[in-house]
Image (cartoon, helix red, strand yellow):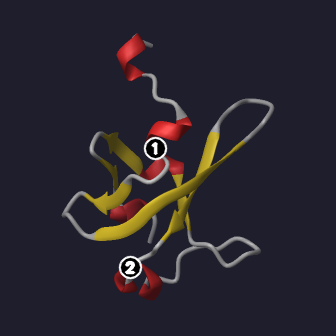
Amino acid sequence: MAEEDKKFSKQLIGKTVVSKTGKRFGEVGDIIFETRSGELIHIILKSPTSYTEKLELEKDKENNILIPFSAVIAVGDFLVVAEEDII
């Protein structure tokens, strides 16, 4: 992995989460990962949009909306997710 492909979690926290088509989901509140392998499991959404609330996505015990990290397709100014992978 090239050095420029690496991102720190603090660079992702607060980024706006959008779909490929530009629909806004909310912001990255936190990231859940497997401690043994380091595998990224979920993104916890903060400030979810009304559109996101209607999707009935998976939630944690605190009722936070979870987005599978496997749905992330790009990280730049925004965190872009494949909407078809999370619905």
> x%, y% of residue 34?
74, 40
Q: At label 1, which amino acid type do we have?
A: Leu
Residue 12, disc: 1
Amino acid type at image mark 2: Thr
Q: Judge from the rendering whether residue 71 lies leftward or rightward of residue 62; answer left or right.
A: left
Residue 81, percent across and down?
A: 36, 55
- Give the residue displayed 37% in from the left and 69% down from the top: 25
- 25 up-or-down from 70: above or below: below
Q: Residue at x 45, y 22 (%)?
A: 6
Label drawn at residue 49: 2
Q: Which residue is drawn at 44% across and 54% down?
A: 14
Residue 8: where, in percent of width, then height?
52, 31
Q: In this view, does 58 lie to the left or right of 15?
A: right
> Alpha-carbon distance for marks 1 and 2?
18 Å
Residue 18: quarter of image? bottom left
Of labels 1 and 2, earlier in sequence is 1
- Nearest to the observer: residue 16 or residue 43: 16
Element on which disc 2 rests:
loop
Q: Looking at the picture, does residue 56 appear above or below residue 38? A: below
Q: Which mark is residue 87?
A: none
User: Quick one: quadrant of the C terminus?
Assistant: bottom left
